[in-house]
């Protein structure tokens, strides 16, 4: 910035340096040396501050001071007159203050005022509050810096929940109610962070505890939303607390925290709670209707989500970690195929394409398909892919809309995949047999079958990646079933881009047509299904007149062209609308597979009538001495616990303090430290074990929030540590831990049940738990399966 610019900034206040008399040096200040002088122009004493060019930041500070002092005019702020120039030096001209600056308090200043004055220049700028110059600091205060990470964690959760909510298949209104609560809190926290100087009273000990509790609550809401919006996650809610109960538990705790914190921007939450019962009832009724209608292996005979869904997800997890599980997968395939012998089948003359031949099973004359596996895979990756395909096919047998897989079989020359025979061929072969339109009821029935099969794959998190008529088979009773899983992948797989052919390009989503980084997902599957619905309706190949891949790509992606429906289809408007939405150019606005099933089922049904926390009730100041553990939060204490060189004494003090406030995780950690003898206490050995068992039981019985407590209390019961031995009770708590995903719980529960330690031997249930443990790489469980010839798949 030039000198001329500086003079302009100073509103044209120009003074000749020669107009100042009796210049006397009085010290240094900020950006340079300060003199007092008499101004002939102002007819009074003024202060002259020269710019010190030798100091690295002086020039910037000088400019900043000039810019901001020109903009204020207040009796309590030093008056700025202008600038002048002495030789090469710039000089700032301000009012001269006779009694000096802030550095030495005026004699006679009250001691409290001096203390406040010193606190205002403290080391921690975030702990300083503008209002601290107007009131005595509270002994209840907690430094703002201790709140910062907790606030950031809560704000970050909003971004993490957004894609979970947007991909919700079920309970979207319940999730939205929770999501809106979290967004309201996020807004409040952003404002609180920005205006912290105006809300110094907020940063106290009680709010420090409460905001941690709120952070935990919001994390639990995030987990809850991710679980209740997808069938895989909903499985646990048919076995434990209901969705409604947990919703109210979470919102009660949330509202208690909000009331304690007295947050802004949350007034609308209270009014919204009046409508939440209706929201919950509607969402759960819609879910129950879906489960009642979906069937197809997703639900059991009681219309609850089938345990098979969980088993397939276990196998999928095993396959995703196949680098360490190849031996187990191969063993499972061998066990599965032991019962298949080539001599039990007789060949017929009927052939489908180049690879599939019809055989009859001698024992019951049932038709099966032998699909020739072209060549023995010649690479390790190809072998693993083939092995994984076989492993997953063995578990899809319970879905009525997936072609049934019986196993692998070999003769002296070849290997075959043996599966269910589809008498009517594939979907295109089926509709080509008709001279005119297929009746509406039959079209809708086929559409619902395909939607049901795709929903099953969604429940077990598998994308087919090649939905087209050739891969939809029609059985003798005209049921549609999905086949050909050679390109299928799991949701977490790195999906490779498939080569597009003239056959597949017609069904490929626009975002997958060109070389880019787009990953195949359910939205792509929805698009393919939408095109398939059009073909089923019109009984002809989409873009039939186009026989060039690039031309089809351009029509679909560049021109946004989609084949129109005609009167030939005879199908209702809702069918056409859902198909059009499914093939939309923007994948974000395509319907979900759940929504497509519901629409098609509602159209088909009339044509096919069925046969028929409370608030914290004490003063936190009286319970917790935060300084004793350096204001450590629960999250920091847990991190310290995990650290190799962590201060366990300090962490224990934190856990113990929060345990007194009823925090379940803290109670568990206190029990764990006693159980593992990690710290010295005044307890005797017997008292220590009894107290640890007591804490584990309290946490295990309170909720499923800390399942490891269920496992630990089970071990106490099993070993007689702190309680009397009780194998039956131990099995109960091991099962709780197992149902909440703990692998050790799975193995321990299975072992007790299988060996009959509870006096009630239940080998079948024992095998179920041990198999799940083996699928999760539990070494003892894997050895158990080998020893007892149990397939882990």
Image (cartoon, rainbow, N blue to C red):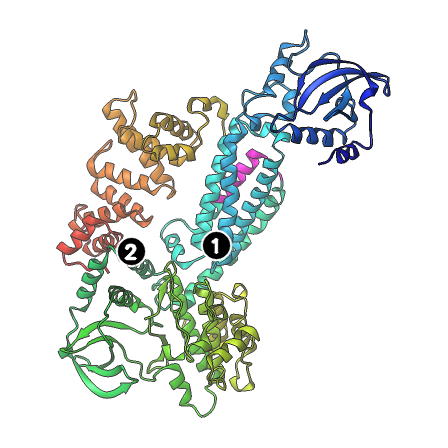
Asked if 785 appears above or below 252 in the picture, the reply is: below
SS of the residue under disc 1 = helix
Q: Main secondary structure of the magenta part?
A: helix
Furthest residue toward top = 108
Check disc 1 and report the residue beneath it: 164
Give the CA distance from mark 2 to mark 1: 24 Å
SS of the residue under disc 2 = loop
- Near mark 1 (Cα within 10 A), the count class, few <14, some 14-19 or many ≥20, is some
Q: Are marks 2 and 1 in contact (CB under 8 Å)?
A: no
* Residue 575 visible to the viewer: no
> 53 or 397: which is nearer to us?
53
Q: Quadrant of the C terminus?
A: bottom left
Q: Which residues make up the magenta segment?
A: 249-264
Percent position (x, y) of residue 51? 69, 25
Q: Name the image quarter holding residue 489.
A: bottom left
* Residue 512 visible to the viewer: yes
Check disc 2 and report the residue beneath it: 321
């Amino acid at each position: 910035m030039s000198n001329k610019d500086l003079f302009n900034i100073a509103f044209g206040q120009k003074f000749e340096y020669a107009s100042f008399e009796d210049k006397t040096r009085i010290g240094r200040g900020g950006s340079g040396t300060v003199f007092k002088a008499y101004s002939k122009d102002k007819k009074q004493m003024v202060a002259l501050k020269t710019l010190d060019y030798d100091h690295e930041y002086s020039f910037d500070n000088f400019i900043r001071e000039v810019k901001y002092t020109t903009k204020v005019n207040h009796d309590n702020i030093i008056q700025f007159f202008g600038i002048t120039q002495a030789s090469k030096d710039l000089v700032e001209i301000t009012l001269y203050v006779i009694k000096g600056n802030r550095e030495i308090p005026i004699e006679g200043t009250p001691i409290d005022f001096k203390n406040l004055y010193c606190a205002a220049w403290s080391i921690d700028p975030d702990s300083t509050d503008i209002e601290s110059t107007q009131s005595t600091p509270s002994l209840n205060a907690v430094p703002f810096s201790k709140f910062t990470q907790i606030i950031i964690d809560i704000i970050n959760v909003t971004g993490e929940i957004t894609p979970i909510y947007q991909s919700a298949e079920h309970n979207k209104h319940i999730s939205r109610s929770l999501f809106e609560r979290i967004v309201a809190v996020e807004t409040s926290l952003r404002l609180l962070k920005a205006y912290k100087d105006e809300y110094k009273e907020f940063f106290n000990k009680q709010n420090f505890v409460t905001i941690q509790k709120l952070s935990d609550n919001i994390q639990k809401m995030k987990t809850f939303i991710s679980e209740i919006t997808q069938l895989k996650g909903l499985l646990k809610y048919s076995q434990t607390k209901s969705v409604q109960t947990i919703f109210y538990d979470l919102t009660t705790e949330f509202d208690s925290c909000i009331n304690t914190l007295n947050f802004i921007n949350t007034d609308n939450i209270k009014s919204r709670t009046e409508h939440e019962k209706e929201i919950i009832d509607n969402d759960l009724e819609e879910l129950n209707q879906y489960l009642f209608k979906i069937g197809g292996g997703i639900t059991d005979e009681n219309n609850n989500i089938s345990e098979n869904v969980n088993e397939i997800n276990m196998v999928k997890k095993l396959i995703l970690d196949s680098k360490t599980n190849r031996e187990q997968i191969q063993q499972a395939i061998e066990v599965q195929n032991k019962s298949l012998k080539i001599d039990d089948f007789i060949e017929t003359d009927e052939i489908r394409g180049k690879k599939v031949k019809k055989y009859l099973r001698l024992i019951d004359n049932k038709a099966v398909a032998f699909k020739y596996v072209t060549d023995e895979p010649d690479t390790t990756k190809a072998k693993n892919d083939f092995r994984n395909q076989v492993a997953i096919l063995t578990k899809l047998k319970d879905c009525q809309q997936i072609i049934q897989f019986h196993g692998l079989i070999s003769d002296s020359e070849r290997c075959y995949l043996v599966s269910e025979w589809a008498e009517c061929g594939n979907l295109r072969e089926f509709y080509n047999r008709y001279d005119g339109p297929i009746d509406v009821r039959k079209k809708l029935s086929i559409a619902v079958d395909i939607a049901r099969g795709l929903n099953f794959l969604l429940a077990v998190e598998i994308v087919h990646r090649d939905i087209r008529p050739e891969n939809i088979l029609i059985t003798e009773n005209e049921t549609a079933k999905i086949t050909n899983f050679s390109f299928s992948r799991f949701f977490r797989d790195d999906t490779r881009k498939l080569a597009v052919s003239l056959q597949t390009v017609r069904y490929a989503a626009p975002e997958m047509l060109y070389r880019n980084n787009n990953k195949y997902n359910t939205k792509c599957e929805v698009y393919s299904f939408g095109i398939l619905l059009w073909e089923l309706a019109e009984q002809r190949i989409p873009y039939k007149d186009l026989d060039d891949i690039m031309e089809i790509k351009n029509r679909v992606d560049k021109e946004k062209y989609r084949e129109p429906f005609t009167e030939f289809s005879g199908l209702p408007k809702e069918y056409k609308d859902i198909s059009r939405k499914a093939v939309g150019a923007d994948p974000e606005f395509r319907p979900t597979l759940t929504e497509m099933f519901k629409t098609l089922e509602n159209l088909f049904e009339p044509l096919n009538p069925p046969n028929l926390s409370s608030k914290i009730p004490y003063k936190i100041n009286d319970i917790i001495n935060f300084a004793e553990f350096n204001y450590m939060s629960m999250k920091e204490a847990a991190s310290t616990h995990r650290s190799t060189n962590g201060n366990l004494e300090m962490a224990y003090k934190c856990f113990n303090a929060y345990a007194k406030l009823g925090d379940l995780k803290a109670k568990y950690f206190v029990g764990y430290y006693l159980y593992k003898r990690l710290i010295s206490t005044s307890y005797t050995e017997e008292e220590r074990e009894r107290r640890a068992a007591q804490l584990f039981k309290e946490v295990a019985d309170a909720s499923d929030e800390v399942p490891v407590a269920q496992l630990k209390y089970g071990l106490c019961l099993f070993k007689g540590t702190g309680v009397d031995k009780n194998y039956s009770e131990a099995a109960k708590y091991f099962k709780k831990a197992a149902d909440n995903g703990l692998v050790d719980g799975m193995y321990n529960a299975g072992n007790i049940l299988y060996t009959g330690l509870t006096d009630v031997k239940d080998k079948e249930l024992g095998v179920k738990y041990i198999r799940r443990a083996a699928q999760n790489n539990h070494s003892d469980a894997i050895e158990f399966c080998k020893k007892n010839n149990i397939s882990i798949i």
